[in-house]
Amino acid sequence: MKMKPAKIFQHPLVIRVTHWLNFIALLIMVSSGMRIFNASPLFAFKFPSWVTLGGWLGGARQWHFFAMWIFVLNGVLAVIYNVATRHGRKTTIFRTKDIHGILPMIKYYLRINKEHPKTDKYNALQKLAYTSVPFLGIGVTLSGLAMYMPVTFQEIAFIFGGYDLARWFHFIFMALIVFFFLGHLFMVVTAGWWNFWSMITGWKRVETVQK
Amino acid sequence: MKTFDFFCIVFLSVLLCSCDATPSGKIEQGLRSFQKFNDGVQQAAFSKNKLAPKIEDKDLTPESKFRVNDYDTHTPPSDTTENWRLYVTGLVKHPGYYSLAQIKELQKQVQNSKHVCVEGWSQNIKWGGVALWYFLDWVGADSNAKYIAVECADKYYEGYDMESARHPETLLCYEAFNKPLSLQHGAPCRIVMPTKLGYKSAKWIFKLVVTNTKPGGYWEDQGYDWNAGL
């Protein structure tokens, strides 16, 4: 058998651009958000200042309310693009039939089962993560608006139980997004260099077996 | 090796982007300009008829927990309540010095409002005073003027757009929890603005100017947003 490298195109330009803009926006949002959090922590914990952005509360707020526009507009663009072009509709969206795939994947990741379950392009857990993360984005945005302007957007603040509870929701949504990011990072590292490279160029090199 | 390369890129980008750099120079200027854009958006989103969410008496912060925030320049005002005057000047028909007794004669408004600090904490306070719009009409302030500026005994200063200043819940406040304001909370007279972040609710005011020149603010001039709309 002879291995022959082949290339497949898997990430269109809009997906790649919005992906990296989202990464930059999130980096700014989370790091400046931690500085804002430190000004009046929700619980007895402060983030070390070296992971925060802005230098002080005023600077952090400037970064946060700048990057929020990138985060939201970019997110809206990505969702519209995905829906309009039906990109990933078959490969990425989590559906009820995928429920059966969850447990085998967990067992595999926990090393209970050695063998990787047979899956489509993305496995059930990946589909679940990729499908739910836009909703985390919506949640973090709405709870953020409820905190930013709790009088003007008091109808949104009401959904979260008022200004003070919206702070908790905002923190939890942020933490879930960071949790997604860490899982995502782990998967990317294990999937290897070409998988990462395809999010930059669009093309993924795969080793195919020549018959 | 491929995993190692990848880690290097992630590590470097994290290092570049999230270092604890106080924005300086061009980045700071850019952020300050963008902040003015956000001020404009907040101003456009502001509705002078939209009241803050109603707060029941049972949801008030206990008076014993009424928080005192120490500003950098915290010092008590120099005057006694009896000698205190509010100097009103600028675009007004009746400029002059107004005593607390005169202000108290105007129709009193008591309201429960959430005081939201820029730091993130909030408190529900029962405030009492005269609606600022009523006071402004009473002194004959030019209703076409754009701004109100106030100066405080502790060298704090603030500025407001006229729409926010004339919001029905903006108070020229002299009471909290049905008692005269304590010294720490701005006695004898302060601004209360439930539609703005706490730093707009200036304490120990002694001068009020009606003007068309955009005033600064103690914290705004250091980098907080001028509009501070809630």
Image (cartoon, grey):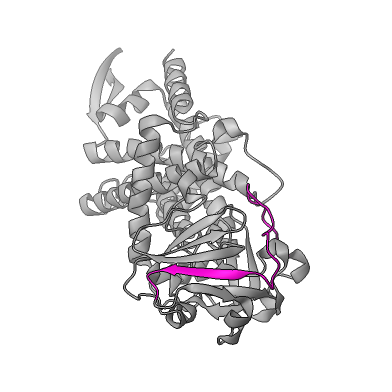
Q: Where is residue B63 in the image (x, y as percent from the top left)?
A: 75, 70
Q: Residue at x 49, y 76 (%)?
A: B132
Q: Where is residue B8 in the image (x, y as percent from the top left)?
A: 45, 18
Which of the 4 image quadrants contains residue A166?
Answer: bottom right
Instruction: Note whether A140 is above or below A48 in the view shown.
Output: below
Along the viewing direction, whichever of A202 and B159 lies nearer the viewer? B159
Residue B115 appears in the figure:
yes
Total numbered labels = 0
The extreme right residue here reads B64
Question: Is residue B79 inside the magenta stretch?
Answer: yes
Which of the 4 image quadrants contains residue B147?
Answer: bottom left
Name the dominant secondary structure of the magenta segment. loop
Q: Horizontal placement of A106 versus B26: left or right?
A: right
Residue B193 appears in the figure:
no
Instruction: Note whether B3 is above or below B223 in the view shown.
Output: above
Q: Position of residue A187 (x, y in %)?
A: 46, 32
Q: Where is residue B178 in the image (x, y as percent from the top left)?
A: 70, 80
Quarter holding the N terminus of chain A is: top left
Question: Is residue A40 inside the magenta stretch?
Answer: no
Quarter holding the C terminus of chain A is: top left
Q: Residue at x 51, y 49 (%)?
A: B219
Instruction: Note whether B50 is above or below A102 in the view shown.
Output: below
Along the viewing direction, whichever of B105 and A73 lies nearer the viewer? B105
Q: Which residue is drawn at 22% across and 53% down?
A: A84
Q: Residue at x 37, y 57 (%)?
A: B214
Instruction: Note whether B81 is above or below B6 in the view shown.
Output: below
Q: Give the range drawn in magenta.
A: B66-92
